[in-house]
Amino acid sequence: ALGTALATQAVSAAPAGLAMSISSAALASAATGGGTALTVFKIMSMTKLKIGIISAVVVAGVAIPVAMHQRTQAKLRAADEAMRQQAEQVNALAAENERLAQAAVQESSAPAPATGPSPELLRLRGEVGRLRQENAVAAQAAARRTNAPSVLSGITANPEMMKMIRNQNKLALGQAYKDLAAKLKLTPEQTGEFNDLLAENAVGCIEPVTDILRTGKSSDEVNRIFDQRDAEFLEKVRTLLGPEGLSEYQTYSRDLTSTLTARQFEPQMTGDSEAKQVKSQQLAQLMREETQAALIAAGLSADYQTAPMLNFRNLASEELAERSLTLLDGIYERVAARADTFLSADELKKFGEFRTTAITQNRMALTLNRKVMAPAQ
């Protein structure tokens, strides 16, 4: 029996919002080991993918044996609780250690009786020694957690599983960038190479993300690492597609959030097909305008990827992920404030629900991916 994907992203015409993960019901099923064989195609059916676009996640569509998934969930919960309790214990031990050390110093400075150290001084010295030993044990446990493999490492060590992950990402990103391939008039062979490149870039972030989560690098360090990865990836795109193709890729990626948001929300608009298409184009243009303004205000590059799950640095840093989600939420807010010129009151209400769901689902998917790439113990 096969379980659900750990954190699949789907960008579709469904009303759940940009780059949403599979439904909450499916995630609940995954947590309990329920469900069977939720492959990409079943996920597409479940989320009513009319356009068929799936946005990439590192572990997109990976079917995991139920027993393994149940153990993974239990291990994550136990690890979180153990880390919390151990942090409290270390803090308490440190405080007690400091108190006893000071008491020992005071006691040792007092005039000693002719018979030698007092029983109280001996007791304090023993307590200090015991606490030092417990602190050392706690430090060793923390070091073991730092060097522990991630939950995902058992999967990525399996060549067949890694092949499945790459193929799922290739399918996902191939759908997301299908229009670009058509615009560039890529041959089937070129399209396959381009999709392979996209998938390899997504899967390639597993190792650096795991290392970052293990070593606890700062947000600035995370940005430096992914800036370098992005530069190397763009050079590969240039090699494959040429300078003009690279420029088209950057423009397409820059507008991806705007385009997909408009496509997703279009089914919830009123009117006939033509009227919906016009409003969808207006929404996409408004999204582009507000995205550009938001990036300038935040001091970010025009090429900053605003789709949270396609900006892989968000997997490595909760702080950067929250910034990304806040940025996207702000864009949606400003779009909603201006969209009353072409959206009705009812449509604006639906867009507000769309916005809330999009942010919630992205945050949940980022968290799940981060958990499976972090050290397991």
Image (cartoon, rainbow, N blue to C red):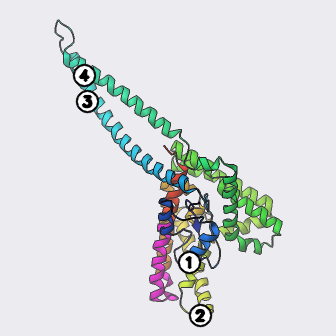
Give the residue at mark 1.
14
Q: Which mark is residue 235?
A: none
CA–CA distance in space, label 2 to label 1: 18 Å
Q: CA distance from mark 3 to mark 1?
A: 60 Å
Q: CA distance from mark 4 to mark 2?
A: 83 Å
Q: Which residue bears the numbered disc 4?
A: 124
Real-space CA distance between mark 4 and mark 3, rounded to the nearest whole angstrom: 10 Å
Task: Identify the residue under disc 3.
Answer: 99
Residue at image position (32%, 25%) is 130
Residue type at numbered disc 1: Ala
Q: Are marks 3 and 1 in contact (CB under 8 Å)?
A: no
Q: Residue at x 67, y 70 (%)?
A: 176
> Mark 4 falls on what kind of element?
helix
Where does residue 64 sit, x and y in percent of width and height?
Answer: 59, 57
Residue at horizontal 51%, vertical 65%? 362
Badge 4 density bin: few <14, some 14–19, many ≥20, Cα 10 Å: some
**At label 3, which amino acid type do we have?**
Arg
Q: Which residues are magenta?
A: 338-361
Q: Position of residue 159 (x, y in %)?
A: 70, 50
Tell which circle, 1 or 4, labels the residue nearer the N-terminal end.
Answer: 1
